[in-house]
Amino acid sequence: VELRVSEAYRERLVELRVSEAASRDLDKYHRALDEALMKYHAMKMGEINKIIKELWQVTYRGNDIEEIEIVSDVDAVAGGGGAGGGAGGVKRSYNYRVVMKRGDAVLDMRGRCSAGQKVLACLVIRLALAESFCHECGILALDEPTTNLDQANMESLAAALSDVIRTRKQQQNFQLLLITHDEQFINLLGSREIADEYYVVFKDDNGYSRCKPQKMSTFG
């Protein structure tokens, strides 16, 4: 009986030591993964904001906003230390906001910018996200991108978008899908150089929407 008890104790002790070692290893891996994710997040935010700054400065024609930037605020909440708890049992959540800068002044854009500035900021941020995360995904879709833009900003947006097209046109799977009523914007893009056809959307006799291909030579 004493021998069986000793063997049972030894088995349980081995199980305990193995479990403790596995738990320590998992904690190390979890901390390493958490640190790697934090570094990757910081790297991608820097990359995105660099593209945003470049696009904004070549696109925006006003002088009241020098650059815009995405800021991520981190909220750390004590967790249970489980698999989703973060290193040291801390859960992180990120709150993103867009700020505008001029000199040393930094203000949130929300509630402080015009409709045109908001539209332009949205377009610039989407282009930056696409360039940063979706380089191998060649579809870029823009729906009425010139809404609320004044003439100067519309022209500069066309120039910036033309640069993106020229850069990405060597990518075999690149496809630009542009929906607009602004014929001047299409002309500014140099559409005859980048496309052979465009589609006209119209209503048929029964009130249904139809698409009809047209040669770019007939545009305008």
Image (cartoon, rainbow, N blue to C red):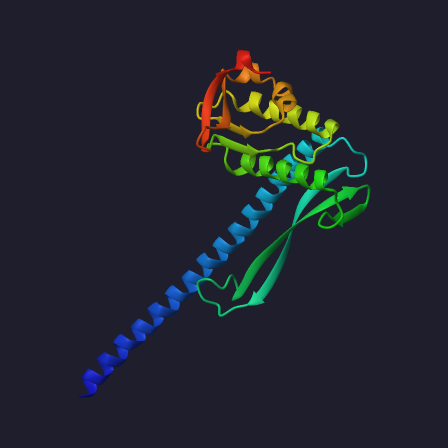
In the image, residue 13 above or below residue 194 = below
On screen, residue 120 versus residue 193, left or right, reads right
List the single residue furthest toward the left: 1
Q: Along the line of sight, which residue is nearer the eye, 30 or 187?
A: 187
| Residue 25 figure quarter | bottom left
Residue 106's spot in the image, x, y percent?
A: 77, 47
Note whether 76 is above or below 197 in the view shown. below
Residue positioned 52% across, 32% down in the render:
140
Q: Quadrant of residue 10?
A: bottom left
Quadrant into which the N terminus falls: bottom left
Q: Is residue 39 left or right of residue 11?
A: right
Q: Residue furthest front?
A: 205
| Closer to the camera in the image, 145 or 97 | 145
Task: Return the x and y of residue 180 as percentages of the image width and height.
Answer: 58, 29
- Taking depth in this image into account, of 126 and 6 the one nearest to the observer is 126
Q: Nearer the viewer, residue 189 or 10?
A: 189
State the residue at coordinates (59%, 38%).
126
- x and y percentages locating residue 50 in the rendered image: 65, 37
At a point 48% along the width and 23% down the height, the residue shown is: 171
Residue 195: percent from left, percent from top = 51, 17
Q: Outermost residue, bottom direction?
A: 1
Q: Is residue 122 left or right of residue 33?
A: right
Q: Quadrant of the C terminus?
A: top right
Q: How many marks?
A: 0
Name above or below for residue 172 compared with residue 11.
above
Q: To which quarter of the image does residue 179 belong?
A: top right
